Amino acid sequence: MKLGEVVELWRYPVKSLGGERLAEVDCDLRGIVGDRGWAVRGADGRIGSGKTTQRFTRMPGLLSISARLDDQGVAWIELPSGEVARVDDRGAAELVGSVVGEAVTLEQETGVSHFDDGALHILSTSSLSWLRRSLPDDEVEVPRFRPNIVVDLPRDGEPEDVWLGRTLRIGGATVRIADRTGRCVMVTMRQPHLGFSPGILRELARRTKGLFGVYAAVLEGGRIVDGDPVLLVE
């Protein structure tokens, strides 16, 4: 049964930095190839993020920096000033540190995943439309929520959390919807073309216990192209 179709695909080569919208992606059992392959690590050993936990440390300014992969799969960063650098260049960490205000390193993923809780993050146009209606004066835009896949649903489609435990075929990949996505202050933060918007997190806390979107595990990898159908398998 067709549920909808893919309308946006996103990859974030460096965790907690701005990402890149793509026309197609390759997906393996880890997730989107190249997604969050790098992370910013502070002097305390924790990974730079929008929140502070035992594993993560909040670093204001990360979202003002963007990252992309070139045709050879090499990650590059771009600062608000327009300056660019390869992530593996020695000076790249100093550039990031100048934005966040502390000494950092840029590290490639090894044995410990850079993901929060899931390989893929999926969000529907149904959920986005509901939140926009609830917050007509806020900038409820896709980049705030950092999904990998945005699925366009029919006007009367239900939010994607009804897919929990179900298996979907998305283009050439098969995924199982594993959990709802918990939200933190990152959805409120300033980033290019978006201002500070604390009302978004307050509304989600009030209406959905802070949950918005879903995480999925990849059962079978493959290519996903913008416009691919999203099918319910079981």
Image (spheres, helix red, strand yellow):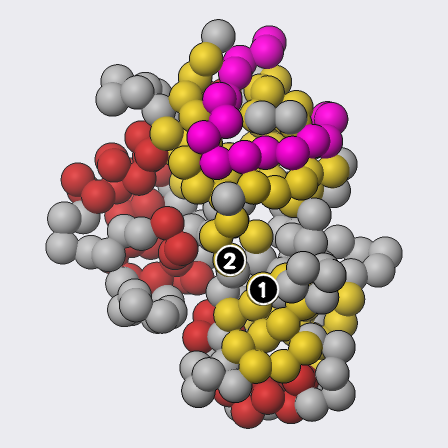
Q: Mark 2 highlights which residue? A: 20
- Give the camera-side residue of 208 and 140: 140
Q: Which disc number belongs to residue 109?
A: none
Q: Which residues are magenta?
A: 219-234
Question: Label 2 crowding class (10 Å Cα cut-off): few <14, some 14-19, many 20+?
Answer: some
Whole-percent x, y for residue 158 in the image: 34, 21
- Residue 15 visible from this viewpoint: no
Q: Residues within 10 Å of mark 1 (few under 14, many from 20)?
A: many
| Residue sticking out furthest to the right | 111
Q: Which residue is mark 1?
A: 68
- The outermost residue toward the left is 137
Report whether residue 157 is seen: yes
For badge 2, the amino acid type reads Glu
Image point (52%, 86%), residue name: 83
At 41% from the left edge and 61% from the top edge, which residue is drawn? 185
Circle 2 sits in a helix, a strand or a loop, which is it? strand
Q: Are marks 1 and 2 in contact (CB under 8 Å)?
A: yes
Q: Is residue 17 left or right of residue 33?
A: left
The answer to whether residue 225 is magenta is yes
Determine which quarter of the picture holds residue 151: top left
Looking at the picture, how far across and down is residue 2, in whole percent? 46, 13
**Looking at the image, is mark 1 or mark 2 earlier in the sequence?**
2
* Residue 226 percent across, percent down from the top left: 48, 36
Specify the amino acid type for callout 1: Arg
